[in-house]
Image (tube, rainbow, N blue to C red):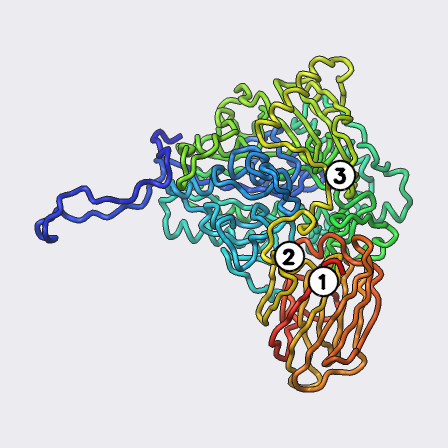
Amino acid sequence: MPDDKTPDILPRPDFHFTGEIGRTFKDSDPATFPQPVQPPKGAPNIVLILLDDVGFGQFSTFGGGVPSPTMDRLAAEGLRYNYFHTTALCSPTRAALITGRNHHSASFAGITELATGYDGYCCVLPRNCGTVGEVLRQNGYMTAWIGKNHNTPTWETSAAGPFDRWANGLGFDYFYGFNAGDMNHWNPILYENKNLVPASEDPDYHLTEDLADRAITWVRQVKSIAPDKPYFLYVAPGATHAPHQAPKEWIDQFKGKFDMGWDAYREQTLERQKKLGVVPADTDLTERSKGLPAWDGLNDDQKRLYARMMEVFAGYGAQVDAAMGRVIDAVKAMPDADNTIIIYIAGDNGSSAEGGLEGSLCENMFFNGFPEKWEDNIKAIDELGGPKHFNHFPSSWAHAMNTPFQWTKQVASHFGGTRNPMIISWPERISDKGGLRDQFIHTIDIVPTLYEICGVTAPSELNGIQQKPIEGVSFAATFDDGTAASKRRTQYFELGVNRGLYHDGWMASAPSFVPWQPVRSEDWDPDQQVWELYKLDQDFSQAHDLADKHPDKLRELQDMWWVEAAKYNVLPLDWRATVRMNAELMGRPSMVGDRTKAVYYEGQVALPDGACMHMLNKSWTITAEIELPDDKAEGMIVTHGGLEGGYGLYLREGKPVFVYNFLGAERPTFTAEAPLPKGRTTLVADFKYDGGGMGKGGTVTLSANGVKVAEGRLERTVPIQFSLGEGLDIGMDTGSPVDFTYKMPFKFTGKIEKVEIEIRPGA
């Protein structure tokens, strides 16, 4: 490891010429230029890969049923870690990963769409929690972030900025990816740095491959330009988060491979895990988590549907590991490949149960509080994984992916939500090739480990701001010594009041709500939570609750949890779920502010939902001033959302059409009988809300130049959010289509002078 120290205060002082200066350059000392910052001598390149929504027992490297040859290769030349922990949810884990602070310390108690106005919950990354990207950049590293960014406040993701909390503002000189929790892999909304990326015209386009290509291009480019400078490449694919979308050739490889069902999968996976040595030989399989059905209790159609959903998921996962393999190949081809540390983390949390007990064709149904029925979903069995659905497998498959543990993503009290595989390769440093490490490690420990091996001092002051101390501890000693003592003695866990406390080999666990329950009563009492107790050196999987046998130890850990909670901004506890996704109800900042009217112009595309007018649960009017070249004009005038929910106002063969996409489940459409004539038209879509609560119906009226041309009823409307990652477009449709009757981008063939959206709160 480098021996030289880097400054405790960043940035370094401005350049000052120290020679003698005369009246002219002739009688002055020779000029010297400020020199580029040099990294510590011998500092390694860093490749940090973070997959999304992955279970401990998902990939084959840790005994799962999804092949992972890239992980296998890195594990064979490096180390496997089977006691690595995340926070049980994406934004919190990612905030901890890039800052080295606990997620509440970094203000990320939840995802950005759940932000509330408390210190630990506002999802505005504090400036006193500087990122590893910023620190390495100021110490001579080239930095890039490819893929998912879910750490920018939703109200700061539009073209109006501010941009200081986009990836570029967080210390990454190059960014290519998406600013959202998940993304359509066939029709994504992407940014290169701060610029919207035009939709690909490649008929075989898939986001996973695109992100791998961009990572490869960047590392080749910068090492060609500056071969002696180290780089930090952070690659965060969208897989295997929903939507589970993959090319057919990947999905078809798994035909029939999961017909045994989730219960048998768990048993088979544990046996494989024991043979691989990634779990102790005496590990017991935990019971099926409360509320999940047995595979044998399903009917034949359910089994056929759910097995297919798992085949789709497996193809999606196998594809992303292969794509990461292409990135690794490019890295390995560099001249300094041996001095490159590759950290491959399989998941920012456990596998996701947000598909519900019966699976989902539209994950946004869950986030709006609606369950789905398998009888509806089976009708689309042959379309799963394709561009028409935002599909997600059933909760029981998520539980199986987390073998041998209990529970899933969101459940921070148990390792099914927080225990993720990690593999580290560093040919120049690691000699115990293929070794296993079982020290208790948390996501916050990555940053101090990187600082130690790079010879970088964690700054006490960064960009004029006094920094919070790093809350993680380095585990670099484990690279050389498999028996090194675990430096982490204590770690709290909390997510949606799923609570846990690890201390010196004991784990106290208190689950709150089942993760497939999107609507949660505000009357619930956290003081009535049932706490469990586990001795991890004797019970790897948390299969045996010792709470009754050791009540004093449990009380000790419970008390410690409250101390840690007060220390790290965990309070106040908040167990509300989908209702927090409604930004208007939560009072989150908005570019809209108190306005009830906004005017948009042609060319405004991909305006994020957080910057749009709040059109849910109220009446509204859209007024479009358009000019048509003839009576055959076509194209999108205005749309908000995409395949998972939203609306569109467009012309087809000159006829006005309004479609309302209710979360992919139904698309009531209202069409005028006659085309509009050539020339100027004022086209109005008016919605009169019934009122009486959230998600109620109302009447849609279309009029042209003051004359009603179509009318109809919406029996129900979207209550929480139109879309997970798509916003408003004027004059064309970006992302995915709001219905499937037109071909993207469905550019308007006339001229749009302006589109005005007016909302009527309380009406």
Specify few, some or many for label 3: CA neighbours under 10 Å numbering under 14, 14-19, or 20 or more: many
Front-most of residues 244 and 255: 244
> Which label is found at residue 609?
2
- Residue 523: % across, % down: 79, 35
Q: Is residue 390 left or right of residue 486?
A: right
Q: Nearer the viewer, residue 267 or 518?
A: 518
Q: Earlier in the sequence, mark 2 or mark 3?
A: 3
Point out the frontmost of discs 2 and 1.
1
305 relative to 437 in the view: left or right: right
| Nearest the eye: 555 or 500 | 555
Asked if residue 307 is positioned above or below residue 564 in the image, the reply reads below
Q: Earlier in the sequence, mark 3 or mark 1?
A: 3
Spatial separation of the CA atoms under disc 3 and disc 1:
35 Å
Q: In what quadrant of the picture does the C terminus appear? A: bottom right
Residue 78: horizontal and vertical position, in percent? 53, 32
Q: Which residue is drawn at 67% across and 40% down?
A: 54
> Quick check: marks 3 and 1 in contact, CB under 8 Å?
no
Disc 1 secondary structure class: strand
Type of the residue with mark 2: Asp
Identify the residue position indicated by label 1 in the image.
760
C-alpha distance separating marks 2 and 3: 25 Å
Residue to which mark 3 is pinned: 515
Q: Is any atom of residue 252 visible in this view?
A: no
Q: Residue at x 35, y 44 (%)?
A: 228
Residue that lies at the very extreme toward the left in this rendered image: 27
Q: Distance between the residues labelled 2 and 1?
A: 18 Å
Label 2 Cα crowd, 10 Å radius (few <14 / some 14-19 / many 20+) = many
Residue type at mark 3? Pro
Check disc 1: other Cα within 10 Å, few if <14, some if 14-19, many if 20+: some
How far across and down, in percent of the image, does residue 421 sit? 62, 34
Q: Residue 120 carries which label?
A: none
